[in-house]
Image (cartoon, rainbow, N blue to C red):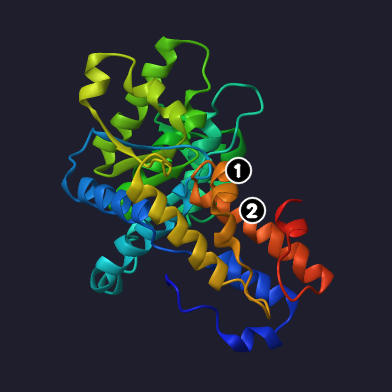
Amino acid sequence: MSKTKGFPRELLKKSKRERLKYFSDFTIAHPRLVDTYEDLMRVIRRTGLGTLVLVFGPSGVGKSTLLRKVQRELIAERVPELENDRERIAVVVDELVGPDSGCFNWKDFYRRLLISMDEPLVERKVIYEKTESPNSPKIYFKTGPRSVTADLRFAVEQTLKHRRPVAVLVDEAQHLAKMASGRKLEDQLDCLKSLSNQTGVLFVLLGTYELLAFHNLNAQLSRRTINVHFGRYLLDNKRDGHAFKSALLTFQKHLPLKEEPNLLARWDYFYERSLGCIGVLKDWLTRALGEGLDEGANCLTDKHVEM
């Protein structure tokens, strides 16, 4: 991550695609991100099994950037261990998809989790039950596509025990709440807590404020979950206002254009339409840059940022 030095000037000789990719990949360590990262890392290092960590905030606040930063740090901390034990992985990262049927699909979740752990031949796994008879042994088996949820969960448990990651980071975890009743919401969390207990792996769920539905179900669930809030910048807070302007200025200096636009002069406009969320601001400026590059513009204009 960088702050205010600006982009490498040789980028101006690169293609539009390379310049856009540079800005798209560029991230900044703004105060909200740093504070939330430090809180989350502290929780991961100290939290015991059977306790779930919920990281929630508004859409576009930067949770995916936070996830990647935590992932890199957990890997970096364990490089010697990973080099000595090639079967181990430091962390597992998965992103939940919105269910087509309106209810969360555990079978799909387990299958995707196995793929995230680079488990080979997920769709060709053979789970068999062997029974002895007086005449001859019989083996009943099922292949991956026909296996039931319980079979896939067992496969996930065995793989997590074998790979021994520190944590499973689940992005877009609010999709877990897509169930028919409050009773089922409790079952969702109980299932993940059981998986944590069985495997010795901590589960961290990142998502929108919909995750609060889990925390408020009952007192027992509240005791077994730890909340980490990743909030947006608030305009009535002087420190927040300064941090937002600083982030906007940093993005301004890293737009790979011949002329630097004066985005800071309209910081209130950018704040209002991004709601103080740096992720929203970054996506917005990336789209504006793409529009400007397509037109061959030397600088972003009001037309580009107001599209």
Q: Mark 1 highlights which residue?
A: 273
Looking at the image, can residue 135 be seen?
no
Q: Mark 2 highlights which residue?
A: 284
Depth order, front residue of 103/258: 258
Residue in the image at 70% along x and 59% along y: 288
The extreme right residue here reads 295
- The amino acid beneath tag 1 is Arg
Q: Residues within 10 Å of mark 2 (few under 14, many from 20)?
A: some
Residue in the image at 53% along x and 12% along y: 180
Residue in the image at 32% along x and 48% along y: 36
Location of residue 223 by image quarter: top left
Point out which mark residue 198 bears: none
Q: Earlier in the sequence, mark 1 or mark 2?
A: 1
Depth order, front residue of 47/123: 47
From the viewer's perspective, is residue 160 above or below residue 28?
above
Depth order, front residue of 4/183: 4
| Distance in Å between CA atoms under marks 1 and 2 | 9 Å
The location of residue 105, given as percent across then percent down, is 55, 28
Residue in the image at 71% along x and 72% along y: 299
Looking at the image, can residue 190 be seen?
yes
Q: Nearer the viewer, mark 1 or mark 2?
A: 1
Location of residue 200 by image quarter: top left
- The amino acid beneath tag 2 is Trp
Q: Please tell me whether mark 1 sits on a helix, a strand or a loop.
A: helix
Query: How many numbered markers are drawn?
Result: 2
Image-based side of 280 in relation to 208, left or right: right
The location of residue 243, given as percent across then percent down, is 39, 55
The extreme front residue here reads 265
The location of residue 285, given as percent across then percent down, is 63, 58
From the viewer's perspective, is residue 114 above or below residue 153?
below
Where is the N terminus found, in terms of image quarters?
A: bottom left
Give yes or no for contact between labels 1 and 2 (Cβ–Cβ under 8 Å): yes
